[in-house]
Image (tube, rainbow, N blue to C red):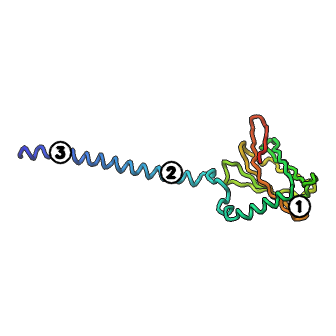
Amino acid sequence: MTKKTMTAEPHRIANRNAALRWGSLIIGLLSLQVIIGIICVILATSDPSVAVVPDYYQKSLDWDDSRKVEAVSDELGWSLVLVPLPGQNGASLQGVLRSKEDEPVVIKSGSVSLFHHTRAGDVRMIAIAPNDHGVIAIDECFVVDGLWQVTIDVKNDADERFVSTNDVLVTQANRRFSQEH
């Protein structure tokens, strides 16, 4: 064997090993990127807190109608006072709906929809019991602390519709509750 053939074999082996090493590194990094992307997609689609506004698309289509309903509700001059009250398994919601003459509104039918701001995809719909005193009472509807969006939609005995959306802050630390409009 010549000297040239003897020195070429170790270089060939070294080149092959380097190609395998660097090729494996590149393939490994690309595979890691694909795996991280798949994990991100799974986390983004399985987390219920990613829903910013429930039924966002439909609400955007119905925006003009909802503005009209709010305007009609404002024209009625009714007032709604909501008070969260502590309970054993969560806070309860109490409210009184009064006419512009400061008389209780007769509630013929209605509903409350509420969701925690970190779980906007988890909307709870609760029916309001008909009554003559304008009372809205929902037991233990706030199961965790934080900011809740509460929408009240009621009709009185004259089929006048009132809709009000409120943000209610529920805190456990001092069992104080406040209402923001």
Numbered badge on residue 39: 2
Asked whether residue 110 is in view, the answer is no
| 124 relative position to 132: left or right | left
Give residue 8's position: percent from left, percent from top: 13, 46
Instruction: Report the amino acid beneath label 3.
Output: His
Point 90% across, 54% down: residue: 100
Instruction: Report the amino acid beneath label 1.
Output: Asn
Numbered badge on residue 11: 3
The quarter holding residue 134 reads bottom right
Instruction: Report the amino acid beneath label 2.
Output: Ile
Point 76% across, 57% down: residue: 125
Dot placed on the residue nearer the N-terminal end, 3 or 2: 3
What's the distance in space between the residues labelled 3 and 1, CA to CA? 92 Å
Dot placed on the residue nearer the N-terminal end, 3 or 1: 3
What's the distance in space between the residues labelled 3 and 2, CA to CA? 42 Å
Q: Quick one: label 2, few (<14), some, or many (20+) residues within 10 Å?
A: few
Residue linked to disc 1: 156
**Circle 2 sits in a helix, a strand or a loop, which is it?**
helix
| 165 relative position to 137: left or right | left
